[in-house]
Amino acid sequence: MATKEPIKKTLRKKRERIVDFGAPGLPINQSHPFYFGFLATSGGLLALVLLRSLAAASQIFVLIIIALFLAIGLNPAVEGLRRRGMSRYGAVAMIFALVVIFVGIFAWLVIPPVISQGSQLIRNAPDLLSNLKHNSTIAGLNNQYGIVDLLQKKLASVSSNGTLLFSAFGGVIGVGKSVISGTFAALTVMILTLYFLASLPTIIELGLRLTPASRRDRVALLTNGVLDRIGTYIGSQLTVALLSGLFILVMSLLLRLPSPIALAMLVFVANFAIPLIGHFIGVSIITIIALTQSISVGIIAFISYVLYIQIENYVITPRIMRRSLAIPGVVTIIAALTGATLLGLVGALLAVPLAASFILILDEVFLPRAENS
């Protein structure tokens, strides 16, 4: 009986095969123009769909990049606590709690005066520009080059009914949307930063497993070197920008410039986000605002700021950034401009440490290979 069952199954399969579905056709001619056109069109449509999807989700990707950037910047502090005997999660919790406390105190102390002084500065901007024409020297330059008139037209073009702040954000509803979206973005960045900071070694290990085993140790060393350089750069640049903001605050208070806290915050953000170029923006704005007080105040502010820039470039920055990778000035400017063009302020912030990482890889990988070839 055991041998009859396989025979019955075989006969049943043969009966099922009696139905003829026809002979298979010839394979598709891959050299036919229609086949090539179909594949090319399908590939183009797929690429278009992917690009539109990436464009629609670009804001999410920007938030992810910012969170990863912050996690890499905080990682050296976490590793320092780990070397003192703390666990990874304990160190992450402590650092993140300190960051949240610092941000809360900073916002409590800085945001109210920045809003009030910034609003006052915006309201007084037309009068400040008009006061520049009272000086004979500036009035002559304006008659010849039209600089003040150009600034007044630009200010008038972005304001309506004398309310620059509301018109810049699209009215009351626009301000509400900006506040909600900004709060959501800040919470998203904080949560992602916490997750990235806690799982950064796991992410690195997963990425290293994708590399060949023969090169894994070398890639691990380069990866840790890049992360260390980026983290050190972020901390160093934050310290340098904070010192520049404190200098502007003290100088503005001594010279009795309008809105000193707002000016200090402007210089801090510009110097932190766009090295070298940020000081050019800061000195231009500070000088113009100081000139509204008097010519002598404008000259003192300009000379003081330029002297501080020299001290920062030759004394402060080398001492603070001696552990980070030295970047040529032209590379910094090109990287900041390229990053700002691609991703705006976020791109300018990320461009310089990425350029430093590229220089590290160039020095450790490509240049030795070129020397030995």
Image: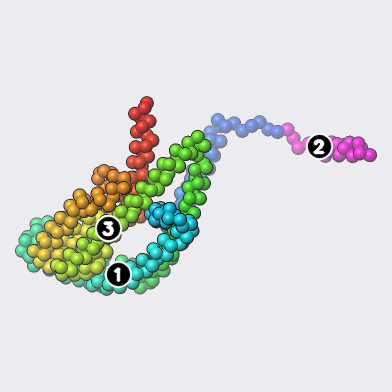
Give the color scheme: rainbow, by chain, secondary structure or one colour.
Answer: rainbow
Magenta part of the protein: which range?
A: 1-23
- Residue at 25% from the left image edge and 51% from the top image edge: 319
User: Mark 1 Cα within 10 Å, few/some/many (few <14, many 20+)?
Assistant: some
**Residue under label 2:** 17
Please state the horizontal and vertical placement of residue 352, each as a whole percent of the image: 32, 48
Q: Residue 241 carries which label?
A: 3
Please state which of residues 371 and 154 is positioned toward the viewer in this rendering.
371
| Marks 2 and 3, the one that precedes in the sequence | 2
Residue 344 horizontal/vertical position (percent): 33, 54
- Under mark 2, the amino acid is Arg
Q: In this view, does 170 lie to the left or right of 317?
A: right
The residue lying toward the viewer, choosing from 232 and 71, is 232
The nearer-to-camera label among 2 and 3 is 3
The amino acid marked with disc number 1 is: Val
Tell me where residue 67 sits by quadrant. Answer: bottom left
Q: What residue type is labelled 3?
A: Ala
Residue at (54% x, 39% y) in the render: 38
Which residue position holds label 1?
110
Query: Which comes sooner in the sequence, label 1 or label 3?
Result: 1
Q: Residues within 10 Å of mark 2 (few under 14, many from 20)?
A: few
The x and y percentages for residue 215 are 48, 36
Extreme residue in the top direction: 373
The outermost residue toward the right is 1
Res 204 visible: yes
Looking at marks 2 and 1 on the same chain, the residue that comes earlier in the sequence is marked by 2
Residue at the image point whose x is 34% and y is 33% from the top: 367
Q: Which of 149 and 248 is in front in this view?
A: 248
